[in-house]
Image: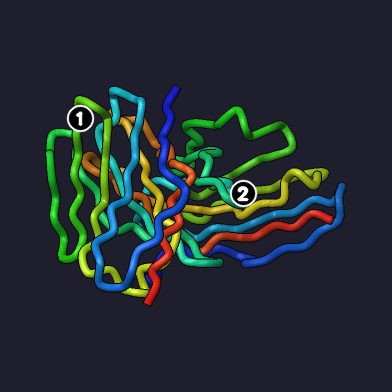
């Protein structure tokens, strides 16, 4: 079945870049997402990428996809203390009736001033 | 667009009681999803609806769980005879249900504590 793996923790200094990594197993994954979750809150969609793309940039966020290795990364430039949160990688297959997304267990990002 | 809303935000109940949660999706979103999230884990899929039809149910959804979306708008998730293992955050999401990314937008969740 589908599986999504992430490293559990990342700590960076304010102003540095953060790179959060994710691997997935489902070859039919067509859409890959990054969500952010702050304490006590729901999930906020940050960005997504199609499986036929290698890279997507959106302001301070850069997503890199290596489809051969099924590896996805999220780079946050100029990380701020407000970026401290849990980041989830998720995948969804592209078939018409595929509704569910499969999530990793999240990477807790701590930004130190 | 007011986003996905969920009620109540918190629910404390005693083991054996029944509980019901409500989710109001983004208006005109055809798909509605329920996920469960326990501490330290990512959301786990429970079920989803396309309009009023329940199209997929996870094996996690035991026979004590039932979800409905009678008019294709809001949805309810009921848990009967709650157990301590049901304690979790229950997340609802909605999506347009059209082709393409069909991105899911999440509500704030209902945190259930079973004593």
| Residue in the foreground of this view, choosing between B33 and A93 | A93
Image height of B109 relative to A104, above or below: below
Q: Which chain carries label 2?
A: B
Number of numbered discs overlaid on the protein picture? 2
Residue at the far bottom in the pictured view: A113
Give the residue drawn at x 62%, y 33%.
B60
Disc 1 crowd, CA 10 A, few/some/many (<14, 14-19, 20+): some
Disc 2 crowd, CA 10 A, few/some/many (<14, 14-19, 20+): some
Q: How far apart are marks 1 and 2 (CA)?
A: 30 Å
State the SS at label 1.
loop
Give the residue drawn at x 20%, y 44%.
A49
Quadrant showing the N terminus of chain B: bottom left
Give the residue drawn at x 56%, y 31%.
B58
| CB contact under 8 Å: marks 1 and 2 | no
Give the residue drawn at x 61%, y 52%.
B39
Quarter assignment of residue A64? top left
Question: Is residue B26 in view from this perspective?
Answer: no
**Looking at the picture, do discs 1 and 2 lie on one chain?**
no
**B29 sits left or right of B114 in the view:** left
Which label sits on residue B38?
A: 2
Which label sits on residue A67?
A: 1
| Residue in the foreground of this view, choosing between A103 and B40 | B40
**B102 sits left or right of B94 in the view:** left
Quarter assignment of residue A98? top left
């Amino acid at each position: 079945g589908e599986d999504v793996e992430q490293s559990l923790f990342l700590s960076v200094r304010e102003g540095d870049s953060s790179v959060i990594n994710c691997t997935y197993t489902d070859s039919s994954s067509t859409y890959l997402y990054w969500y952010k979750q702050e304490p006590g809150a729901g999930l906020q969609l940050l960005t997504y990428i199609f499986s036929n793309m290698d890279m997507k940039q959106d302001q301070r966020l850069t997503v890199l996809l290596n489809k051969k290795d099924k590896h996805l990364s999220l780079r946050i430039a100029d990380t701020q203390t407000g970026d401290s949160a849990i980041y989830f990688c998720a995948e969804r297959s592209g078939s018409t009736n595929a509704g569910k997304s499969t999530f990793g267990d999240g990477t807790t990002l701590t930004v130190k001033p | 667009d007011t986003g996905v809303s969920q009620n109540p935000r918190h629910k404390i109940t005693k083991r054996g009681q029944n509980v019901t949660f409500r989710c109001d999706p983004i208006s005109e979103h055809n798909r509605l999803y329920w996920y469960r999230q326990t501490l330290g884990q990512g959301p786990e899929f429970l079920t989803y609806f396309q309009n009023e039809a329940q199209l997929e149910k996870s094996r996690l959804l035991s026979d004590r769980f039932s979800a409905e979306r009678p008019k294709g708008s809001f949805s309810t998730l009921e848990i009967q005879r709650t157990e301590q293992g049901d304690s979790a955050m229950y997340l609802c999401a909605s999506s347009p249900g059209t082709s393409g990314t069909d991105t899911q937008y999440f509500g704030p969740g209902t945190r259930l504590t079973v004593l």
